[in-house]
Amino acid sequence: MADPRGQLIWHPVRVCEVSRPKVCVVENVANLYQRFRDVYDLLVSELQGLGYVVVNADMPLFNTKDHGVPQNRLKMYLVAIHQGRCGGADPCLRWQAPPPLPSCPRVRTFLLGDGPPLTPGSRQSHRARVLLKDYQLTRTQDVVLDVGASPKFAKATLNCCPCLTATRTASKQGFFAKTGDGRINACLSRNEKVRLQGYPHRLWHPTKARVSEAQFGHQMGNCISANVFMRLVPAILKASGVLSRRIRVRDYWAELVTVCEREGVACRL
């Protein structure tokens, strides 16, 4: 936490102190909860001191792959609801976290096949060959390689994408995908990385964007996974009293997983 970037965790507290929103969601790395519990407990205490009830203080971790997108991305999502602005009811009694979905779509349903090949002779190409030696893929299996990492952290993930970090998401050769059916054998494209964060791949257009492709990739590696947030929102609205708990909200990602598995088609975001 000595890194100046680590001090950004206190910005939501300052926003809550000044603006007093009804709901505040703090997203950060899982290590804040797992390794820096003293800082985590202080963050929760600061929010409580401002009149907020942290409804999921005991279980703030959510993984992107458990909520409909095949990316192994474990993050902290802390949900705080202002006690004085929810009709007097205890938000903790209304809170029901979205449960993990029973399965996750195969990573190939999120891939478009528009990524560039690995540069022959590059260090990424060498790491891909080393990592792929351990995998004899069947037609139903896929693997995504984190080839842009240092040798210590380079890894392969079967049927799922490794966590999209900011640095390697900004690189055109940060991740390499290979599907067992032979359809894809290339680096992840910009559009595929966007989809693996739960966003439509039309989010960035080269002629309309105000940032470079590398800058956009860096931002995508740092951003919140859309699918996790979309599944959190109904639970937040019900816990804060905005929605009645009797109202059934459509679970878009549960429906999408069902369609992808049943039809084996590319995921439409």
Image: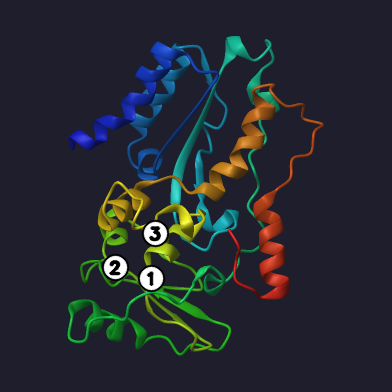
Quadrant of the image occupied by residue 234: top right
Residue 83 placement, left or right of 118: right
The amino acid on which the numbered mark 2 sits, given as a three-letter code, is Gly
Kind of element beneath mark 2: loop
Residue farthest front in this picture: 207
Does 96 sit above or below residue 262?
A: above
Q: Earlier in the sequence, mark 2 or mark 3?
A: 3
Kind of element beneath mark 3: loop
Front: mark 2 or 3:
2
**Mark 3 lies on residue:** 163
Total numbered labels:
3
Q: Are marks 2 and 3 in contact (CB under 8 Å)?
A: no
**Mark 1 lies on residue:** 188
From mark 2 to mark 1, how far is it between C-alphas?
8 Å
Residue 41 placement, left or right of 260: left
The amino acid on which the numbered mark 3 sits, given as a three-letter code, is Cys
From mark 3 to mark 1, how far is it between C-alphas?
13 Å
**Mark 2 lies on residue:** 174
Q: Are marks 3 and 1 in contact (CB under 8 Å)?
A: no
